[in-house]
Image (cartoon, rainbow, N blue to C red):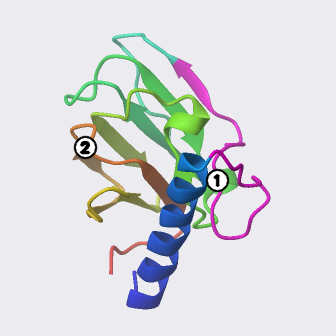
Amino acid sequence: MNVARRLSVLTASSAVAILAAGGLALSTDAATAQTSDLSGLTSGSSPDFTCPAGHTCFFSGDNFNGNWWSLPNSTNGGGIPFDFANNGITPNPGSAHMNGGSTLWLLNTSNGHEACVYDGKIVLDGDYTYFWINYGENTCN
């Protein structure tokens, strides 16, 4: 992710946090930040859940266990930041699995920490507040 893109995501995320703290609402149609309307989000708590191909899955536990949320990469992969809490993914996930030729980026708006995974698993420790998917991208650069 280039520096300009990171700054735009940080700026958008900060704006969302500031507006929310002030009691103002940010439209979900905004081009830079989206706080709801994940397409095709499913959830459950089965211990035998396997993340389907072409999906990103989040887990409440740090070991890819507990409650899970799954969403298709193709319909949510426009690089738009989504807020976990505003999309019903609470508490913030402990782990994630990117299963399908795309890149998952994560951001903590409080401390600016970023993480990225391409087609694999990552332990999150509940540390991240926003995520975005770059559909078809095969690098964390």
Residue 124 numbered mark, or none:
2
Can see residue 100?
no
Q: Residues within 10 Å of mark 1 (few under 14, many from 20)?
A: many
Provide residue 93's location: percent of width, then percent of height: 35, 34
Q: Specify the farthest residue to the top.
A: 46
Residue 98 numbered mark, or none:
none
Q: How crowded is mark 2: few (under 14 residues within 10 Å), some or many (20 or more)?
A: many
Provide residue 116's location: percent of width, then percent of height: 31, 63
Q: Is residue 127 left or right of residue 49?
A: left
Disc 1 marks a residue whose amino acid type is: Asn
Numbered range of the magenta stretch: 23-43
Residue 76 numbered mark, or none:
1
Write the residue at 69% across / 36% down.
40
The answer to whether residue 71 is above or below residue 76 is: above
Q: Is residue 140 left or right of residue 51?
A: left
Provide residue 1's location: percent of width, then percent of height: 39, 80
CA separation in Å, label 2 and label 1: 20 Å
Write the residue at 36% across / 29% down.
59
**Magenta run includes residue 37:** yes
